[in-house]
Image (cartoon, grey):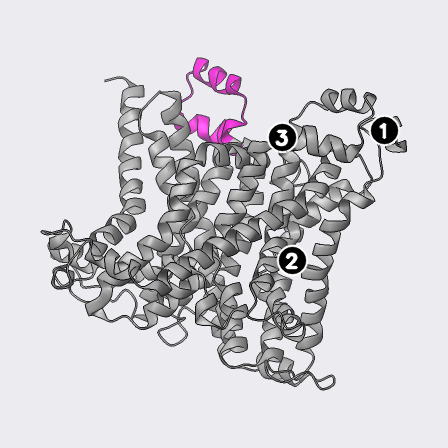
Amino acid sequence: MTAAAERGPGQGHPAPWLVPAVVVLALFYAVPVLDVFRLALSDATLIQTADGVSTAALRSILTDPALPQVLGTTLVFVAVNVVALQVIGLVIALTIVRGERRGLPGMAAFRTLVLAAWVVPGIANGLIWGMLFDEAPYGTLNSLLGFAGLGPVAWLSDPQMALVSAVIANLWQGTAFSMIVFYAARRGIDPVLYEVAELDAAGPWRTFRSITLPLMTTAIAVNSVLVSVQTLNTFDSILALTGGGPGRATEVLALFTFNTVFYNLDLAGGSVLAVMLFAIAMALALLIGWLGRPRGPA
Amino acid sequence: MSAARWGDVATYAALIVLAAFFALPFAWLISLALRTPSEIYLGAARFIPEAPTLANFKTIMSDPAFLIYLWNGLKLSALGGGLAVALAIPAAYACSRLPFRGRGGVMLGLLVVQMISPLVILLPLYRWMDALGLLNRDLSVIAVYGALGMPLAVWLLKVAFDAIPVELEEVAQIDGASRATILLRIVLPLSRPGIASAFILTMVMNWSQFLIPFILLERDADWPISVAIFNFAGSVSASTTQLLAAACLVAVMPAVVVFVVLQRMIVSALIAGAVKG
């Protein structure tokens, strides 16, 4: 009989069990992040190693006239997505819960449809929406609009419209995550509260305002942060949809970082941008710790 | 009509609008993939092709390179998902069964690292893989997939382990079983649905991955399907849209089908994770 066996299941040394996870966290997260900081203060390119400390990359990125535009696009892209993803996700979650309660058919099928969009690879998402937004007369949306005597819309060639199109494509794919979180949160609310509301003859809007919404604030707050970070880090669907264009109209920070490193081969500059991405994500992560305190994260 | 009835009408009205939005891209993709080249130019008027053809799929699937891309995608995703789950099991067990100081910290840390963009950590990893001679080797991609999937897997497995009555383990312990034996003989078999959910979710994530194989694998023949369709799209003109649609459909279908078939299990695992976390 080993020593551990005498102590019962509640005890034992966690260290050996945690070794694989800790090694992975160190090798694939902690050390690379530190290395990115080091590279940001170097003059490394993708094909040339760092040669001493330098702030040249930092200065050239910070004074790059493209940066303010990229950050502005990122802010708009993330902000609009965070609001729209959650509003649609909440509407879907509450609608499905209501439908299930009333025993209406079709709820599972609808949930499946939303989830199916979720597992479409980002690159495929960009390519599929690229076909839908095709501006030729035979493009999906333009030919549909043509039936109604409208259009054609310059979905991808107009800078502002291109950003709208990128948001639509992201909404299609991203809504499922918020739907799951809100569905779980709504199902976690004690049904007795709704019975009481019904006895008090409270209408649906009043019930939503006084019971559903207040009891879901933690879920909404935490989900807002998660969705912001996810959206901030999204770039493969935009890469496939617009390539960041026209001009830089849809070039978000993650895509700008990708282009800087892997097309311009500017590793030091890309590292400066990666540090920015990391810093924004971590600032948002700290928010989650603070928001999730009363009930734990997510 | 009662208020509840009107509510049902409103429910369906909302769902129909939303369902149209979510279904349109799939429906259009299928429509394009079944058309002949000349029907592409007819747009929505030929939403249902007059003479649906499987020729596009035949063209795609008869290209041996395409089958290799699919196989590469399957191989990398499955091995990466398996690695993530294997790495996660001990940590999830410790977090579920061993009350140690800093357990909350470990779980929170795992949540936080998931917020780091793969792009950030890939910059140094690319250089290290290069220095180690692992560039263009499947191993490099699988290792990164394992690291990226592990945090989610720990969360899902911890929830699955929490659901197993601790009394079962106590009995085994009285019989003299070591903790490793208990984990292998009792805990793991009883948490098969949780393990399967974690494996499938990480695998689906890997199937969607573009950045990591795109950067770490430079040779055409090593690419998974996600990278290959991006490259293929660059060479497509209007006259081959139907081929791109067929290729996209083939790339999307495996993940969608697996997810739809197993969604009850996966979604309940996710919901359990969201609630208990």
Q: For the residues tagged 1 and 3, is the chain the same?
A: no
Image quadrant where one finds the C terminus of chain A: top right
Q: Which of the 4 image quadrants contains residue A223?
A: top right
User: Is B164 a magenta residue?
Assistant: no
| Magenta stretch: dominant secondary structure | helix
**Residue at the spot of label 1:** A5
Callout 3 crowding tier (Cα within 10 Å): few <14, some 14–19, many ≥20: few
Q: Are marks 3 and 2 on the same chain?
A: no
Relative to the observer, which residue lies in front, A208 or B179? B179
Which callout, 2 or 1, points to the residue nearer the camera?
1
The location of residue B69, given as percent across then percent down, is 41, 61
Where is residue A80? Give x, y as percent.
43, 55
Q: Is residue A216 visible?
A: no
Mark 1 Cα-neighbour bin, 10 Å: few <14, some 14–19, many ≥20? some
Q: Position of residue A68 (x, y in %)?
A: 51, 74
Pointer 2 residue: A282
- Label 3 sits on a secondary structure element that is helix
Q: Is residue A206 visible?
A: yes
Q: Which residues are magenta?
A: A186-214
Check whether the beta carbons of the residues at disc 1 and disc 3 lie within 8 A of each other: no
CB under 8 Å between callouts 2 and 1? no
A158 vs A111, left or right, is left
**Residue beneath disc 3:** B189
Which of the two labelled residues, at mark 2 and mark 1, occupies the earlier sequence position?
1
Residue B1 is situated, as x and y percent measured from the top left of the image, at 23, 18
